[in-house]
Image: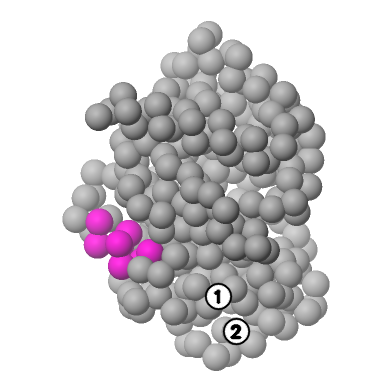
């Protein structure tokens, strides 16, 4: 196998799971294994995953007897992986056609990057409604406004992930495990790159807004304080530490427009 796709599942809708699975299994680059960790889902979801794995020998299904969180599940996937390159896939999103074919060769040819991601397309039940572009060469300062990588869209080097301790499984990092991991990797000297193409389709709808409970915004503020301190972004980062508390009151569509405006400014500066 050339690379490994890793996914954590917890009680996702079957229709969305099928969409995600179809987007992975229909990729033009097929030389992969897909490790899925069922994080204590209901029986209907687990049965769906068992059937999926039974139809394709590349799929390996791991099971947590009880819900342990995404970080714990992904660490299990990382440990079980047999390849050097790992590609994330979330259960309610889709990989755009050709995503693997663009991401994997780039990672093979550019070993200096521990993280490689892409721009994304935003969609809901009515179809695509927007795009998000990220800095091509993310720097530490890009962690201030918002996370410069979409978690589901990234490719990671297994060796770097293991060497730096993998995902943090503490309760306070739930819903923020990506921020904690990526900022820690950057603080330890790793670098990332963003392919300037929309290779990942991120579901952003009314349900996505409901997922962002305010207590997770409080946890995010705490994690940002620690992350910015490790990245040398304090004290100028203090306003961004408290930003999640204010952002929690904004409609998701407005937040995405603000993110897009910020990254357009960054691209203009780079050019």
Q: Element at badge 2?
A: helix
Q: Horizontal and vertical percent for residue 226?
A: 57, 23
Name the one closer to the observer, 34 or 122. 122
Magenta stretch contains residue 61: no
Q: Quadrant of the C terminus?
A: top left
Name the one closer to the observer, 85 or 29. 29
Q: Residue at x 59, y 13 (%)?
A: 238
Q: Residue at x 32, y 49 (%)?
A: 195
Question: Is residue 191 left or right of 57 when viewed as pictured?
Answer: left
Res. 240 visible in picture? yes
Magenta stretch contains residue 101: yes
Q: Give the main secondary structure, helix, strand or loop, of the magenta stretch.
A: helix
Circle number at residue 214? none
Q: Horizontal and vertical percent for residue 6?
A: 50, 64
Q: Does 213 sit above or below residue 86?
A: above
Question: Is residue 241 left or right of 5 when viewed as pictured?
Answer: right
Q: Element at badge 1?
A: helix
Res. 76 visible in picture? no
Q: Which residues are magenta?
A: 99-106
* Residue on which the image places disc 2: 52
* Residue on which the image places disc 1: 21
Marks 2 and 1, the one that precedes in the sequence: 1
Name the one closer to the observer, 66 or 5. 5
Residue at the bottom extreme, as displayed:
55
Q: How many marks?
A: 2
Residue at the left extreme, as displayed:
109
Residue at the top extreme, as displayed:
235
Q: Are marks 2 and 1 in contact (CB under 8 Å)?
A: yes
Which class describes the residues within 10 Å of circle 1: few (<14), some (14-19), or many (20+)? many
Q: Does 11 sit above or below residue 242?
A: below
Which numbered mark, 2 or 1, is in the foreground of this view? 1
């Amino acid at each position: 196998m050339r690379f490994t796709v890793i996914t954590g599942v917890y009680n996702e809708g079957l229709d969305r799971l099928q969409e995600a699975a179809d987007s992975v299994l229909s990729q033009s680059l097929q030389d992969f294994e897909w490790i899925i960790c069922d994080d204590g889902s209901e029986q209907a979801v687990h049965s769906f995953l068992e059937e999926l794995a039974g139809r394709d020998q590349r799929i390996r299904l791991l099971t947590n007897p009880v819900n342990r969180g995404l970080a714990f599940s992904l660490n299990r996937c990382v440990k079980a992986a047999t390849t050097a390159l790992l590609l994330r896939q979330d259960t309610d999103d889709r990989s755009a056609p050709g995503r693997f074919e663009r991401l994997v060769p780039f990672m093979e040819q550019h070993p200096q990057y521990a993280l490689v991601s892409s721009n994304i397309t935003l969609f809901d039940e009515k179809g695509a409604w927007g795009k998000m572009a990220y800095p091509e060469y993310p720097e530490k300062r890009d962690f201030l406004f918002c996370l410069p990588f979409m978690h589901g869209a990234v490719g990671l080097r297994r060796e770097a992930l293991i060497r730096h301790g993998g995902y943090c499984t503490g309760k306070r990092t739930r819903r923020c495990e990506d921020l904690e991991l990526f900022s820690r990797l950057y603080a330890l000297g790793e670098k990332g790159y963003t392919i300037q193409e929309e290779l990942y389709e991120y579901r952003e709808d009314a349900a996505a807004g409901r997922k962002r409970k305010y207590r997770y915004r409080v946890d995010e503020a705490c994690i940002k304080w620690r992350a910015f301190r490790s990245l040398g972004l304090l004290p100028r980062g203090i306003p961004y530490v408290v930003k999640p508390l204010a952002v929690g009151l904004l409609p998701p569509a407005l937040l995405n427009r603000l993110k897009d405006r910020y990254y357009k400014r960054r691209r203009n500066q780079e050019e």
